[in-house]
């Protein structure tokens, strides 16, 4: 299976996911266009994080396939999918709390080149300068230059999310998956993150975003897929989704009163 349209970076093709008697995902078929921001929304328990876990290889679908850049990635291990060009920002930031902000961002750069995380990477002195310069660039991108030497575990929740984003960006992914990127943030931090993600979009990076905050969704998304009870019930532009009566009933109406 492959996609004939080269503008489609990610194709989730007829994916089903069952956990015993629970049908967590059913008949999921969506396409993510290159350079676009594709948002996935829906009420709690709709299957959004399950869908992302299928896309990054943390879960194997009961049936169906995930195609990335024309290649079936279903059955590949998470690190293999990452090496292929897919990076993910998790709902709970996955960072190295005992390392500095700088070392956190340098680590995935070495992993990208060496094929595995090696936390003794500072011993590779002949390559450290180049990677340090690149890491400092992305740390500046996310507005954390002042925290360069701060231990990651001491950061606020919002800063941990921005740090994890820098850790993804230094991998130069073709596709960036973000699971609730503004969860737990203040409105100020949320707006800062929106501007950062807009800047990333200007560089042509393709993104899939799961998000509950409709301000974030409608500020960033080119296309929205709406999940409810494991099924896509609506899909379209933000204006189309906002006006869809099924969406209002299943989700938007209950959150925007």
Image (cartoon, grey):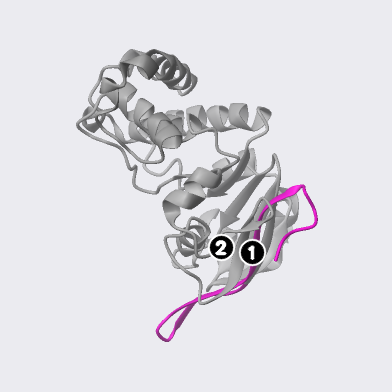
Say which quadrant the C terminus sits in: bottom right
Task: Report if residue 211 is visible in the image.
Answer: no
Q: Which residue is mark 2?
A: 251
Q: Secondary structure at mark 2?
A: helix
Against 203, residue 36 (above or below) is below
Disc number placed over residue 247 in the picture, else none: 1
State the residue in front, 256 or 147: 147
Against 234, residue 86 (above or below) is above
The spot of residue 229 in percent (x, y) is 52, 74
Instruction: Label the magenta part by its dominant secondary structure.
Output: strand
Q: Residue at x 37, y 26 (%)?
A: 106
The magenta segment is 1-27
State the residue in front, 86 or 190: 86
When asked about the image quadrant of residue 108, the answer is: top left
Disc number placed over residue 175 in the picture, else none: none
Q: Residue at x 70, y 60 (%)?
A: 235
Task: Report if residue 82 is visible in the image.
Answer: yes
Residue 74 lies within the magenta run: no
In whole angstroms, how far apart are the C-alphas of marks 1 and 2? 6 Å
Q: Find the residue positioned furthest to the bottom.
A: 21
State the residue in front, 135 or 184: 135
Mark 1 vs 2: CB contact within 8 A: yes
């Amino acid at each position: 299976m492959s996609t004939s349209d080269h503008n489609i970076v990610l194709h989730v093709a007829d994916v089903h996911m069952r956990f015993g008697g629970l049908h967590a995902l059913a008949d999921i078929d969506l396409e993510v266009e290159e350079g676009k921001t594709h948002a996935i929304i829906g009420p709690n328990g709709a299957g959004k994080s399950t869908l992302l876990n299928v896309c990054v290889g943390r879960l194997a679908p009961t049936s169906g396939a995930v195609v990335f850049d024309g290649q079936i990635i279903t059955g590949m291990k998470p690190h293999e999918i990452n090496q292929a060009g897919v990076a993910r920002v998790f709902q709970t930031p996955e960072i190295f709390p005992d390392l500095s902000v700088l070392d956190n961002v340098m680590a995935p750069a070495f992993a990208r080149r060496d094929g595995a995380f090696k936390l003794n990477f500072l011993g590779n002195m002949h390559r450290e300068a180049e990677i340090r310069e690149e890491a400092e660039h992305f740390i500046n991108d996310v507005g954390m230059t002042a925290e360069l030497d701060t231990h990651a575990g001491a950061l606020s929740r919002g800063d941990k999310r921005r740090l994890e984003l820098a850790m993804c960006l230094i991998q130069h992914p073709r596709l960036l998956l973000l699971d609730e990127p503004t969860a737990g943030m203040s409105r100020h931090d949320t707006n800062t993150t929106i501007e950062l993600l807009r800047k990333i979009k200007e560089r042509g990076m393709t993104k899939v975003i799961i998000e509950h905050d409709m301000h974030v969704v409608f500020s960033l998304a080119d296309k929205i897929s709406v999940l409810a009870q494991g099924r896509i019930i609506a899909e379209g532009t933000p204006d189309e989704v906002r006006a869809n009566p099924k969406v209002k009933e299943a989700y938007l109406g209950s959150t925007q009163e």
